[in-house]
Structure formats: C-alpha cells, structure tokens
Image: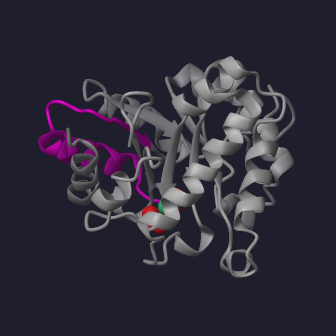
Amino acid sequence: MNRRYRKTIIAGNWKMNKTATETKKFAEELKTMLPKAKWCDVVVCVPFVNIPAAIRAFKDMRVAIGAEDLFYEKSGAYTGEVSADMLKDLGVKYVIIGHSERRQYFGETDVTVNKKVLAALEVGLHPIICVGETLEQREMGITMELIALQTKAAFAGVPAEKARKCVIAYEPVWAIGTGKTATAEQANEVCNAIRATIRHLYGARVARSVTIQYGGSMNPANAAELLAQPDVDGGLIGGAALVPEKFTAIINAANQE
Ligand code: PEP
C-alpha cells in the first residue's frame, strides 16, 4: 500500500452467489462490523440482478457497488447483455472487466476487454481490469510478458486522464478459488511490473496514482502480509468476500495506519 499517492481499495467479487434477500442480510451484518473510520475504499461487486438491492442495502455505509461485467455496445439487439449506461443509471461505481472466469468460460479476449474498458470509462464507471497468468504460463517463464501484453491491450486508446480512473487487479489464475496464494513477494513483483507498464504508457505521475490490487485466495490470514507490499494497493476477493466476518477482517488489515 502507498496511501500517499493512491487509494487502497478492498473489493469483493461475489461471482454467481447470493440472492437479493441474502444481499440485504449480508449488508445488515457487515454494518455491525465495519470500522467507523476507513483508510481504504470498500467495494462490493454483485450479480446484475442484485444491484438495486445492493444499492439500497449499502446506502449510508460508504460501500460502493460494482458490477461483475458489462457489454461494450451502447444499446441494441444484444439479448441478455447489460450496457455501461444501464449500470451507471442504477448508481454503480465500479465494474470488473476481464475476470479470468470470463476469459476462460465466456470467450473474453484482450480485444473485448479493451472495448469494455473504453465503454465503462465513457460513462464514468471505474473499471477493475483483471490480468493474470495460468500455472502453465508461469512455469513457462512468460508471466511478465503476458501481463504486460494484457495490460497494454486493456489500455489501448485510453487517454492519461482516464487511465487514472482505472483499477488493475493482478489475479494469477492458479490462485483463484484454489486456496493457493501467491507469496507476498510474487504478488508485489508482478504488481510492480504492471506499474512499470503503466509508467511506460503514461509516465510516472499516472503510474504512481493507479491502484493495483492482488486477487487470488486472499483471506484474513494472509491479507496483512500481501497488503504490506509497496505495490499491492488492495485486494479483489472472491470466497472470503461472501462472509461478513472474513471480509471485515481483510478491510481491517487494509485499514492499518
Ligand atoms: C476472484 O474471484 O477474483 C478471486 C480472487 O477469488 P478467490 O478470492 O476466491 O480466490
């Protein structure tokens, strides 16, 4: 973390979990646990259908609501899709783009990620752009090249003043939902390399101000060590974000002065 130059952001990714009723219950429980003063921003990214319930339930808690995806077209004949304008109109602030599960199961590519980033920024949403290598890619020794490529592709055509509004989540695919966490050193090494790519694209001032999270089995036991790394500015959290006690413990780990 480096709060002097950039925000620390703890974001939950609920994936395809919880109903609207369960969303309300989670918010009520979290309210009793959240620290009064927060030195980090807290975001909860929920399934599309739960967004109105989440906006209502987290109101007054200084918890921003995020979506888990969007479609890049403005409107039209795209059955089942949801546009950036629709999310913005509901009061959504953040949107996860390019999560590895979308890349793996739903055909997301670096090209569609870029289109979605541009669509989100156009309406003032903050994209949380996910990048990360598979175990095979790490073992082949191509992690850094791959992450640089994913990052450059995601930011194609994004001007510097909008690049500042983006969050990047480094999520090694082998660590997502597996209980295997990158070591704090591995996480910091890649987050540092992502910052170097942003520096290369936009210069030192933008690179210094961009929040880069780590995601992949972050939990109350490993959060403090990961978040203590200078280039790890928060977490994107799956499993542990579904349990108010665990999510609060991670927020507390990010809330150290
Ligand atoms: C994620 O889905 O972005 C994630 C990091 O999941 P988990 O924390 O469960 O590994």
> Which residue corresponds to the image point at 31% horizontal and 33% vertical from the top-left?
58
Front in this rendered view, residue 98 or 77: 98
The color scheme shown is one colour
Q: Where is residue 188 in the image (x, y as percent from the top left)?
A: 49, 57
Q: Can residue 16 be seen in this view?
A: no
Q: Would you say 18 lies left or right of 148 here?
A: left
Residue placed most toward the observer, 191 or 78: 191
Question: Image point 30% across, 26% down: which residue?
Answer: 59
- Whether residue 195 is situated above or below residue 131 in the rendered picture: above
Visible in this render: residue 155? yes
Quadrant of the rendered structure where residue 197 is? top right
Asked if residue 161 lies left or right of residue 36, the reply is right
Q: How many marks do you count on the picture?
A: 0
Position in image of residue 242 (x %, y %)? 35, 58
140 vs 174, left or right, is right
Q: Which of 129 and 74 is in front in this view?
A: 129
Above or below residue 253? Residue 114 is above
Q: In the rendered view of the protein, which quadrant contains the N terminus? A: top left
User: In x, y percent, where is residue 132?
Assistant: 65, 61
Name the residue rendered at 56%, 42% in the picture: 48
* In magenta stretch: residue 156: no
Please, is residue 12 above or below residue 208 in the view?
Answer: below
Quadrant of the frame with the C terminus: top left
Q: Give the range drawn in magenta.
A: 16-44
Q: In which quarter of the image is residue 142?
A: bottom right
Identify the residue shown where x is 76% and y is 21%: 159
Q: Position of residue 30 (x, y in %)?
A: 21, 45
